[in-house]
Structure formats: C-alpha cells, structure tokens
Image (cartoon, coloured by chain):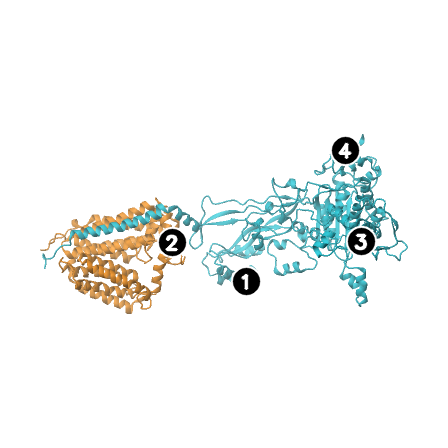
Amino acid sequence: MRRLISFRDFDWVLLGFVLLICALGVLEIYSTTYGTKFAGAHVRQIYWILAGLALMFLVSLLNYQILLENSLWFYGAAIVALLAVTFFGKKYLGARRWIQLPGGQHFQPSEWVKLVLIITLAKYFSEENDRGASVSDVVKAGAIAAVPMLLVLKQPDLGTALTYVPVAVMALFLGGIKFRHAAIILLVAGVLAPAVWIYGPRLHLLKQYQKDRLTSFLNPDADPQSSGYQLEQSKIAVGSGGILGKGVLKGSQTQGLFLPEPHTDFIFAAWSEEHGFVGALALLLLYLMVLMRLIHNAQTASDRAGGFVVMGVVAILLFHVLVNAGMVVGFMPVTGIPLPLMSYGGSSLLFMFLALGIVMNIRMRRFVN
Amino acid sequence: MLGRETKIPQAKFTAVQYVILAVFLVLAYGLWSLQVRHSDELQSKADAQRIKLVPVLAPRGKILDRDGQLIVDNYPSFSALLLRDQSRDLNNDAQKIADGLHLAAADVLDKIRRAQLARLPGFQPIIIKDDITPDERAFIEAHRDEFPELETLMVYRRLYPADGFMAHVIGYVGEVSEDMLNSPQFETYQRGDIVGQSGVELQYNDILRGQDGSRKVLVNSKGKEVGRPKDANVPAVSGQKLKLTIDLDIQKAAEMALEGKNGAIVAMNPRNGEILAMVSRPIFDPNQFAVRISRDEWNRLTTDPAHPLMNKAIQAQAAPGSVFKIIMSVAGVEEGVAQNMKVNCQGGAEFYGRHYACWIGTEKHSAHGITDLSKGIYQSCDVFFYTLAEKLGIEKIAKWATALGIGKKTGIDLPNESTGVMPSEEWKIKTFRQKWYAGEVISVGIGQGAVTVTPIQLARTIGGIAMGGTFYQPHVVDPADLPEGYHGQDQSASDPAEAVHVPIANQDWITITNAMASVVNPEGTGFASHLQGIDFAGKTGSTQLVSHEFLKRMAARGRNVNELKNEFKGNGWFAGVTPRRNPEIVVVVFLDGGEHGPLAAHVASLVIKAYVEKERRVRNNPMLFSDKADPGSVPIAGVWSAPADGDSQDHEVADAEDHFQGGTLLLKMGAARLLSRPKPAPPRAVGSSGVN
C-alpha cells in the first residue's frame, strides 16, 4: 500500500510564494531596524527561515496519518501544557504565557495548540460522513475548541485565543454544520458578546486593557499615547506612502520611530509606507496566491482529514492576514497578532513552516490511496 | 472505514475562495482609501509631526545719532540650555551643572520640573541661565562628554550705553507681555518675542525689529533631531538702522549738566523740531532689562518716589512758574493789552480782595516800581503779570496758551507723552464740576494754579515764540529717514514737518525776545548763567508746591519750617534759546523738587555753551551766535521768521541792532552746514540779497 514519496510532488509553487513573502519580510525588517537597537534582526530572521525550511522538510517526511492517529494524545498534551502555563508559567508584562525551559529558552504552548486543534478537529470530522453535523457534533467540536481557548484567555492572551475561532469555524463549516445551528450559535454569541463586554472584567473573562484597546479602535482620539495613537500612526504611515512609496530606509514614520513595533506587529504598515499602494497590493496578492494554492492542495488531498487539515491552515493564515492588515489600515483593533511569514519572530515563523510542512506532507501523499 | 469516507464537496471550497476574495477586496479597499484617496492629507500629518520649525532670532536694528555715531548696538550673548532628548537622568547631573554655572541645584531642578509640568516637547530645550560668562561657557565646552545634555545658544542682545546714558529716550526691550499681545499693534507677535517696551525701542519697534528666520528640523517621535530637510532655512533679517536727531555731543553735555540732580532737559532745534538732546534724571540702566531684570531691581525702580523709569522730559507735568510769563506776554500783545501796559510794583498788590505778593518782597526798597512788559519779563515781576492776567481774563489766556501749545501733547514720537493742563472755565466745569472764580486767574498769570506743562511742551512753545510764532512738532527721528509709508505708533499725529503758525507782530516779537536776552544779563533774574559772547536768551521759573500761607499755618502748629520746605520743595525751570530770535536751539531745564530757576538757567547754559562751541568748531566760525555786531555779518533774522509769504518785508523794517543780536548768520560761512529743514531760502541766497 505504501509507495515511495518523492520531492517531485513537493509543492514548489507554494514554497516559491512563501519564500518570496519571507524575503520581502527580511528586506522590511532590515529597513525598520536599521540604526535601532534591533539592528541585525533581518539576519536572525534569515536563520529562523532556514530553520523553518528544515523543519518543514522534516515534517513532510513523516506521514500525517500518524499525526491524525495520535491526535488525542496531542490534544491531551496541549491541555496539560496550557494548564502548566496557568500554574507554573513565567509571568511577563502581566501575562502568564511562557514556560521557562532549561537553557534560558521560553516555550509558548498556546502557539502550537492551534496546530493540535487543527489536527484534532480534522480527525474528529474525518470520521463523520457528509450528511451533515448533528447537534452533538457541533457541541463536541465546540468543546474541543473551547477548552484550550478558555485556558489561553485566562493567561490572558486574547489575540491567540481568537485565532482558535477560525479553526473551529472552518471545521464546522466543512463538517457540514446545519444552517439553523449556525444561526443559533450566532444568535447566542450576539447575546453573550454585550454581556461579556459589560461583566467580562468583573468575571475575569476580559481585562480592562483589552476593552480599552477595542474602544480606542472605535475612538482613536481618546488617548493619543495608547493603542489609538498606534492606529493613527499606522494609518499615517500607510497613507503617506502614497502610490509608489517612499523607498527602503526612507519611510519617515518608520525611521522616525512614530510607527510602533515596525518590524513585528506593524510591519505591513512599514512596508506600505516604503513601497506604496503598488507594493502593498503586490504583497496582498502574494498572500492570496498562497491561500489559493493551499486550497488547491486541500482539494487534491487523498482523504477527507487531509483536506480538513489544509483548510485549517487556510483558516489560520487568512485570519492572521485579515486581522493584521485590517489593523494596519484601521479596520481592526490592535490585537498584537503578527503578519505570518513577514513579521520578525522565530515562534511565528516556525509555526507557519511547521504547518506548511504538514500541508506538503498531505500533498506528497495525495495519490497514496 | 477507508473508502467509505466522502470527500469535502467542491462547493465548500468555492465558498471559502469567495470569502478569501472578499477579505482581500476589503483590505485592498482599505489600502486604496489611505494611500490614494487620503494620501495628501496623511502625508501632511506625517510632515507635521516630523518637521519642527526652530526660530532663528533676528538682531534688532542699531540706533545711531544724527551724525551716524553708534548709540545702541547688539552683542552676542550665550545662554546655557539643557537638552531633554539625551535620555540622561537630568536630576543626577543637576548638582554638578549647577556648580559649574554658579546656580543653585534646586533652581535647576525646579526648571526641569516646570518644563515637565508644562509638557514641553522633547526637542524644546530648557534655558537654565541667560547671558553666561566666558568662564561658564568654558565649563560647558570642557564637559561636553560628561554632560552631553548641556548646550549653549547664541542670541543677540541689546547693548545700551553704560550708566543709563540716554536711557529714557532709547527705552529698553523685553518679552512681549500678555497685555501687549492683546493690542492690535502687536497682534502678529507671539509669546516670548522680544519687543521694545519704552522709548524709541517701543515707538519704532516695527523698524528696529528684525524678521526672525527659521530652521526646519526633522525630529523623530522622541523629539530628537534626526536631520535637516533640504529647503530648510529662512534666514533671519536683522532690523533696520534707526538714525535719531539726537546729537551725541549735546546729549553728553546735557547728561553731565543734570548729573546728581532730579529732573529733565530737552534741547531742540525750533526751526524743525529735531530733538538734539533729552535727559531725564534719575536714571535706570536699560542693560538690566536686556537680559532679565531681577525682581528686586524692578521693585526698586517702580517704587522709587523719584520715578527713575519715567521720562520726565515728556511725562513730568509741573506748574511752569514764571516761564509762563512769556506765554502771558504773547497773549497780552496779541490782545493788544501788554504793549503799552505799565504797572507800579510795590512788592505786591490787591486783586479780587486778596493780597498777592511779588517774589521781590515788600520789605526791600528795591521793589520793581514802574514796570513795563520788558522789565516784567527780565525782572520776572509778578505784579505786572497779575495785572495782565486780570485784564485778559482766563478765557483769553487759555485761548492763546492753547494756541501756543500749552495743555496739549506736542505729538513727539515717543510713547506716553503727558498732556499738561491749561485751565479754562470749561476745563474747570468738566474736571471739577465747579464754576471758575475770576480770582483764580491771578495765579495763572504767573504760571501757578492749575497750569501744568511738560518740559517738551515748554521747549516747543518757547522755541516757537522765539521763532516769531512758528511751532514745529518735536521729533527724535527725522521722518525723511523713515521708510516710505511708515506711520508711527500714534496715527493721529500730524506730519511733523508741518508747522503751526501763531504770528506775533514784529515789534512785540523783538520786545519779548530782547527781554528774554536781558534775563541772563546783569539786569535779569538769570544773570548767573550769563554766557560771555553768546547771544543767549531765556526765562527762569521757580514754583512752590504749597503757598506761603500753608507754610505759616503749619509752622504755627509747631512744624519746623525748614523741614516743611524740604518736604514740599518747589520746582525750578528755565527755557533758553540761542540766538534769541530764530534760534537754532531751545533748551528747557526742569529741576524736580528743591531747586529754583537760576540753577535751572545755569544747567541750561551749559548745554547751550556745548552747542555753540560745537557749532563754532564744525562750521569753522568763531563768531557764530555772537552777541556782538560783526561787520561782516548780514541780518537775516526776518527771513527765517517768515511764517507765511509776504511777512518778510515787515521784518526788514525792524531795528537793525535787534537783527544783529537775533538770527545772525555770517557771510563768511560759505561752507556752513546747511540745515535741511528751514524752508524759506538758503543762507547763501539771503546773504547776497542782503548785500544789495
């Protein structure tokens, strides 16, 4: 039954788009950190990319069926890790998100839980047929997503917790959720949201600063030094870039330190300032190509679970791009969600390459059955 | 299990693809909205927060005297600044910096705290000390590494003459006040701008003030300078030079003459109104205002009863005393009363049922006796002028005195001139809501009562009378030297070149001016100020602030009369001209408190003497303004006095002898400096016609 797999079946087109985005990211990290205390970050980013590539190839060799079969174990480990963070985690900047590893390294489990969630949900729905998801399916799938989400919310890390939502939504959608069930969920969410908004801080479901971030998004002039100020500076950066941009190292918003976190969360704003409308559209187009290519891989997956996994990756990538780019152009609140493949940071890069490795894995085995 | 499982339907993938497309279209719309539609607006926002304008202060214009000698200059002064974008803990360095700059550490910390409280932007430095010494500059230079936040800033400051020389005319500069910013004159100014606060500095601020330039600086979000844009600089344009009519030599003589006294001197050319010298005492040092005056010094200056900040030459209002008799004389002759009036002075007389004393006293045998107008002037006989006042009545006196300029501003181009008072029936009703009592006119006749004048007023009036009734508006800057279309602060002021004419009949003019000449001759009250060989004429005035009756009453209550006299010291006046008719200079001396006319006459004579000596030297004519007839000279006085056309013939009928004593100009002086102002005919032409 097993056949030799070959790297000829590797999705080189997808990898090409991905590496192009990474390269633009390195360029923009170089530009934004030039002359600051972060100078040289672009070199470290290259190392992370190389490490990511290695990880991707490694993961692609391992049959994803093994991952699916052990999904329960992974899920269990994820819950334990999140609990460990809650009890033994290292507190930093008011949040308990990391576990101290020997050798001074920090491990942030919530980032990897996304992947576990994708696999677990894919596994759950692969055992169902396409007659549609029953009420118990919806409740079970909801619970699978809700448990880690609440644990992450507790840390507190609203941004990461929110990234679990698209995974669950995508799984339910592909799993065949009935229209009326979806309507009921939306209705309940519509009722609960204001309640959480008002009573959230008192019930420790929502922190006051999280509320403030959201309100400052709606009313950016309230406090010019806070996240409203960040949004304003981001819009000025993007807008002042004009059609053709100001050029590498020439963005006044970026180079003048007006733009906050220009090499991480706001790298898309820095890119848009220095490369203009044309550059920003080109970058969006690259992400669009990556997403479309991913969907193509989901369509050609040899089994239902593989399609679920790839579409889970699509959901996460789309959500990140939407929230990050939406924040930069002022449509979304400041949530601290990085732009995948572009923002500086090893954790986010390794996650993306790991996810891509699994996608490659699925693609390379598309003719297996 | 395998094989039974169904694939994900294609429709779902398509649906996801549409969702993705929608998301990207929304994002693309967001980018288009910012980068295409609102690009310009956001670009200007970006520029607004990164380009800061740093002002470059322009030096003010220099002030020169009439010969171009420098009076007020600028000097480069350094201020010590604390830069706040150096991310250093300023509190730690404060003690050492304070020591090096000879400040208290608490003051430095206080300034830092206040800047923080005021939320000053980071690129705006704090000035911790103005006008630092070379030592302190060296300290900053030597500690550049240790205190990178310490910086120096060069600004131009005003350098005024030392010891308050000419302080009142020049004035001083300072930061524009809140009140000034609210006035239309300063509406274009901003807080912190340096403007003239008094004197010429205020009056001609618009000319002296330069145009501040600016420097564009690129800053980052911390306010730290990160570069300079290319089109950055608007250079500062320094203010225009201002040439005064003041003659430094005469000014020096006047300053010295008034040294140690309290009062004012005005020296003016009555032929055109140019102020040659103006002094007020006591003085203040405007250099103290050029940096920042200490609170103690300011309090001392503003509470000093001698009013050092007041320019007494234009602001002191005091009874003119006997100098007013010249104005009375003109009123008298104009009304046809005084020419042939004779009074027998017995040291006093009875008017409206009350006894009025003459200063000469009754106990002496030397009472004035039979006195005509001439003797009334040079002997300053009170009884003669009491009688004249009684005959004229207050309305006629007020009419003529007002016409001659009493009780009115002269319109001099200096701020805050006082008006003085010329009482009249109408004035009394307006001011006190009381009827005028006929008896009040008697004191007015000798320049007492409610009459008050300023020294500048008296200079214009007495100078104009000696000119035969031609009055020019006094000014310290020749309007011809001002830029085209420039109007001073006082828009209501008439054209200074325009003269006012109150023609005085030739014979009366000669009588009055001759009598004024006698004042400083043996027969007069100012003989002590006689100037040998100089045609000098004038009138003394001594006033008392309280009556003899008041002193007697107080003495009766056990007060020491001498102490009282000290407390209520009178004022001394002298108004003098050279030559006596069509003078080139009129000098008014006002001594505030405890002085008397003859001393004022002496002070004036020193100024006149300095003027005559200088002009004799400059024009190379030792006989200039001589009181002796010179065979080579030609009488031309009548020509200059001509106020309007046709009058000059009348003057030539006048006694030749008088002309020699009056506006004598010598034929020899071919190379004489021609005065720009006198209108009629140049001296050379007159001279040749005189020969004919």
Residue named by callout 1: B107
Q: Say few, some or many: other residues with alpha carbon within 10 Å of mark 1 (under 14 / 14 to 19 / 20 or more).
A: few
Tell me the quarter of the picture where residue B567 sits. Answer: bottom right
Give the letter of the chain under mark 4: B
**Mark drawn on residue A78:** none
Residue named by callout 2: A232
Mark nearer the viewer, 3 or 2: 3
Side (left or right) of B111 relative to A273? right
Which tint was used for chain B?
Answer: cyan
Q: Say few, some or many: other residues with alpha carbon within 10 Å of mark 2 (under 14 / 14 to 19 / 20 or more).
A: many
Residue named by callout 3: B442
* Residue at (73, 55) in percent of width and height: B262
Secondary element at image label 2: helix
Give the letter of the chain under mark 1: B
Image position, residue A174 (x, y; %): 18, 56
Which tint was used for chain A?
Answer: orange
How far apart marks 1 and 3 lie (CA) works out to 63 Å
Q: Which mark is first along the chain, 3 or 1?
A: 1
Residue named by callout 4: B686
Image position, residue B476 (x, y; %): 67, 45
Q: Three-letter amino acid code at disc 2?
A: Glu
Mark 4–mark 1 contact, CB under 8 Å?
A: no
